[in-house]
Image (cartoon, grey):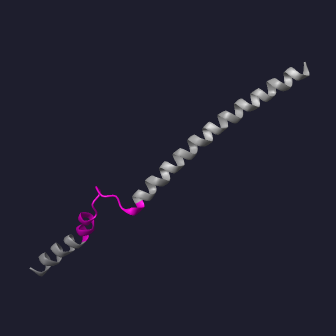
Amino acid sequence: MKKRILSLASILIVSLPLVACNKSEEGPAEKAGKKIDQGISEAREAIKDSTETVGEKIEEAGKAIQEKSE
């Protein structure tokens, strides 16, 4: 009888953290992680746009230099 109670208690103790952890609710770490991911995505897009703009300006400058040299 003691073994049975001890086994049941062990199972409850081991399974309690799994039951207590509700996956449907976001904690502060998950919310912060999502905000960081969003910020990184926005920064990546801004860098991409800036790089394209700089590339266009470099091409324009190259064409202007070429025209002046002719």
Q: Identify which residue, 62 or 21, lies in the foreground.
A: 62
Q: Position of residue 45 (x, y in %)?
A: 56, 40
Give the total number of marks visible in the rendering.
0
- At horizontal 23% and vertical 64% (from top left) the residue drawn is 19
Q: Residue pushed farthest left?
A: 1
Q: Position of residue 10 (x, y in %)?
A: 21, 74
- At horizontal 12% and vertical 81% (from top left) the residue drawn is 2
Relative to residue 16, is residue 30 drawn left or right?
A: right
Q: Position of residue 56 (x, y in %)?
A: 70, 30
Relative to residue 12, is residue 37 drawn left or right?
A: right
Q: Position of residue 34 (x, y in %)?
A: 44, 53
Residue 20 belongs to magenta span: yes
Relative to residue 67, is residue 60 drawn left or right?
A: left
Q: Which residues are magenta?
A: 14-29
Q: Identify which residue, 52 or 16, lies in the foreground.
A: 52
Q: Is residue 32 above or below residue 3?
A: above
Relative to residue 25, is residue 7 drawn left or right?
A: left
Q: Identify which residue, 7 or 60, lies in the foreground.
A: 60
Q: Is residue 15 above or below residue 35?
A: below
- At horizontal 75% and vertical 28% (from top left) the residue drawn is 59
- At horizontal 91% and vertical 22% (from top left) the residue drawn is 69
Looking at the figure, which quarter contains the C terminus? top right
Residue 45 belongs to magenta span: no
Looking at the figure, which quarter contains the N terminus? bottom left
Q: Residue pushed farthest bottom?
A: 2
Q: Residue pushed farthest top?
A: 70
